[in-house]
Structures are given as structure tokens and as C-alpha cells.
Amino acid sequence: MYRRNRSTDYTLFSLILLVFIIGNKFANVDSFNGVIWSDDKNDFVRIFDVPSFAKLHNDIIAKIRSTEAYNFNGTTLKLTAFPIKNLITFRNNNTVASGLHGDVWELIADTLNFKIRYTSISEHEYGTQSKNGSWDGLIGYIYRNETDIIPRTVVFPSRTTALQFTLPMWMTGYRLYVRKQLQHHNTWMIELFRPSLWMSTIALFFVLVFASFLQQTLNSGKMKGTKEADHTASCTLRDNFFYVFSIYCNQGWLPSLFERRAKILLLSTRLFSWLLIIAFSSKLISHVTQREFQTPFEDLESLYRDTNYKVAVKQNSFVYSIFARSMRPIYKKIMNSNRLSPGIDLESYEKVCTGKYTYFEAQDEMEAKNSKLCDMTYVGKNYYNGWVAGGLVRGFKHTKAINTGVLKLLENGAIQRLKSIWLAPSSKLESNSSVSESIALHHLSLIFAMLLGATILSFVILLIEIAIYRYFNRRQIIIAGKRPPI
């Protein structure tokens, strides 16, 4: 093997050390992978086994750990936010914060030994970026270095020009919400049974009709020449249809001859009808009184196409910027048709509770405000997903220390416990819930509608039969040479 001379080795060693020092000067280098030839061991060894490199490496690790375990020693940091129920609220003259984010930052402050000076602002919006690069709203405060911390922000690349993010705390999704309005299930009579069971029941009905007619036909052949033959022959297929249907409904009248000559068939049909009625009535009450939530639309496309709903959003929010700047056709259509309704947070929420509006908002904020004014539920799937994190002023020197505090709360489950305390349970936002109540007249509207329809149809058939009877009666009179009555 080729061996370099000692002066060459020293030159190469000095060059590697110089590169390492320069890299450490201009970047946060915490490792330097590789090997170097050792004359003493006559083999390649790890760079960090060389005492000079090992000392530099240990100094870097110690520096990194000192920034992660930094003790603020009671330093006061300014936190600015606008109150959101169950997320962050202020009391005792803005000296104490509560809510999910308030408790999270109180725990981080206790862990890292710093104090928080809270500032509540009147703007209830996170803010958007203007064409000149500046920000308004809550993000504008941290962009202008007027605060050190904002307790909540969703991680979007565009916001990195205004602040730096802490470690993400949880994932949230942006979706549509509407007021949960329970409606009566008017088709309960049809949907008591599955379609396959209805088809089987109808098929069995026709089988019984033809079996009954066949039995009557066979019996009429055996009774030729008897007094009952004429009556048996008069039981047509139509008669058997109505007879079997009356048995199905467990009502009506049957000729005595029909009962005597078809006892087995009648018994089996009645047993099946009893079973059918018992099965139908067992769930009747629950279905009659049931109310369910029916989504008025599934997404923005069906909202625009099939309804006259408007989309309520917070002014100068992320969702508002999507509608204002997105190139997707559906956003442009809603904007151009004046069906986007921006406003302050409470105002947008009230619109959904009182009119035909849908609220486009983050899930964690809706879970915090779910029981505020009215019961809401989501519609469709998430349009956007994003990580929720805290915001720190750009150039903040101890970001790693803050991230260490957030990581500790994630590891010991403190953030998850606080979420279960302050946010509404997910079951309250389910869209398939139903409520039952006492039976009222409008619950039976389908039955009365069917009776009314049957009455009208019977009256129409009666008029048709009268007209047909008069037509043929007059025709017979004309054929007989008599003058028809006027």
C-alpha cells in the first residue's frame, strides 16, 4: 500500500481541521462523519477518536445542550393574543391566562423558569400578508417585534416571513361546519326493511297468489257438476290476488269455500303475515319518532350548485386569503357570486346559527367553541391540514429551549390531557346522531298521505267505471233501436 510521508499527513490533517472549524463557524454542525489514517495504529480511525477533533466535538455538543437546557432565570417574555373561549382567556387584569393554550404556555414557563406578561388585543384575526410584505392582525404584532410569543398559529410556509414556529403540538384540519338541524325521517315506512327483504316479500306474495290460483283451478276440475263448481270457477287470478293481499295485511274477508279448500296454504300465508307484522311493528315506534341530521351539501361544489348557502369566514384569516388568492375555479365562483361572507369571529359564528351559512374554520377552534351559541357539525372532508404550534419572534435566541419545553409536555402527555379538558369531545361533532321524541300527528304524515292518495285513486276509478258503464249501456240501447235518455 502506498504510504504518504509525515509532512503530507500533517498538511492533510490541518486542512481537514480547518474545514471543520470553518463549518462550525458558519453552520450548526454537531457531527463530522468520516475516518482518517492513523500512523500510530497503521489503520483508518474515526475522526472523533483524534483528540483535537474530539475536543471540538465535545465543545459543540456542550454548546448545543446549553441552548436546549437554557435557564431563563425569571426573564419576562411578552405574549400577545386575542381571547378565544377554551383556547386562551385572560383574568385578574391580564395577569393570568387559562384555556388550552394558556395552560400550555404556563407549563412551558414553569419548566424553563421564565415569566409571561400577557397582552390582549381587540383584533380577532390572525392576519394576512400585504403586497409590500407586511402583516396585519395578530401576526402583525410579532412581525413588528411588538411581542415575543403568540400562543397559537398554524404552520404555513408563508408565515415564516413574520415569525418562527415552535415544535408542532397537534394536527388540525380546515373544513366546513353547519348548524345541526334534525329533521323527521319521512320515508321511515319504506326504510324499515332493507330493499332485499322488500323484494323477497313481494316475490313471495306473487308466488302465493299463483299457488292459490293453481289450487283453486285444480279444485274446480274436481268439483265439476257440483253446486260449488260455479262459485269456485268464479275465483279468478285477480280474486286470489286481493285475497292473499288481505291475508298479508291481516284483515279483510275470505269466502268460506276458499278457507275450506286451501287450509294449508292459508295457514302458511297467515303465519308469514303475522311474522311480517311483528317484525314491522317491532321497530315502528323508534322509526316514527326518529329525527336525523341530513347534510345540505357535501363540499363547496355542491354548496354552490345545489343550495343558496353562503360561506362565513373570519376577516383576514388563512381561509379568507385562500378565497382571495386561490386560482381554483370554485373559490372564484363563490367570491364572484358574493357568497363569501367575511366578518369577525363571533359575527361569523352567529350567522351560521341564525341563517343559511356554513363556517369554514379549523377543527380545534370549532371544538373549543362548539357549545357557545348553537350545536354545529362538520360537513364533508378536510380541505386543508396543518400543524398547530406557537409563534416566536424572528431572531429569538432560545428557540431550542422553548422547543425542549414543548417536547417535554408532549412526552409526558400534558398537552393531550389539556386537550381532553378544554376541547369538546369528538362525539359532539358527529353528523350521524339522531333524537327520538313522543309521537305527534306530523310523524304519521306519510300514512295519511297514502290514505289520501288511495282515496283519490278510488274516486277516480269509480268515475271511470261509471263512465264506462254509461257508455256501454247507451250503446246497447242504441243497438236495440231505442232512443237513449237525455
Image (cartoon, grey):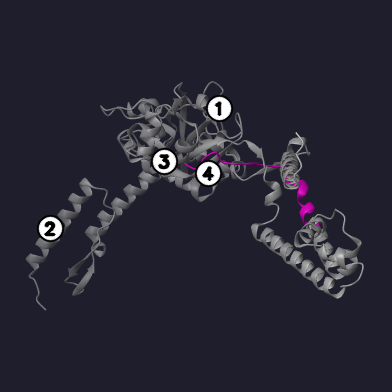
Q: CA distance from mark 3 to mark 2?
A: 37 Å
Marks 1 and 4, the one that precedes in the sequence = 1
The residue closer to the viewer here, 202 or 486, is 486
Tell me the mark number nearer the camera, choosing from 3 and 4: 4
Q: CA distance from mark 3 to mark 4?
A: 15 Å
Q: CA distance from mark 2 to mark 4?
A: 49 Å
Rendering coords of residue 397 (x, y %): 33, 37
Say few, some or many: other residues with alpha carbon within 10 Å of mark 3 (under 14 / 14 to 19 / 20 or more): many
Tell me the mark number nearer the camera, choosing from 3 and 2: 3
Q: Secondary structure at mark 3?
A: helix
Q: Residue at x 66, y 57 (%)?
A: 194
Q: CA distance from mark 1 to mark 2?
A: 73 Å
The residue closer to the viewer here, 184 or 453, is 453
Q: CA distance from mark 1 to mark 4?
A: 36 Å
The residue carrying mark 2 is 15
Tell me the mark number nearer the camera, choosing from 1 and 2: 1
Q: Secondary structure at mark 1?
A: loop
Identified by mark 2, the residue type is Leu
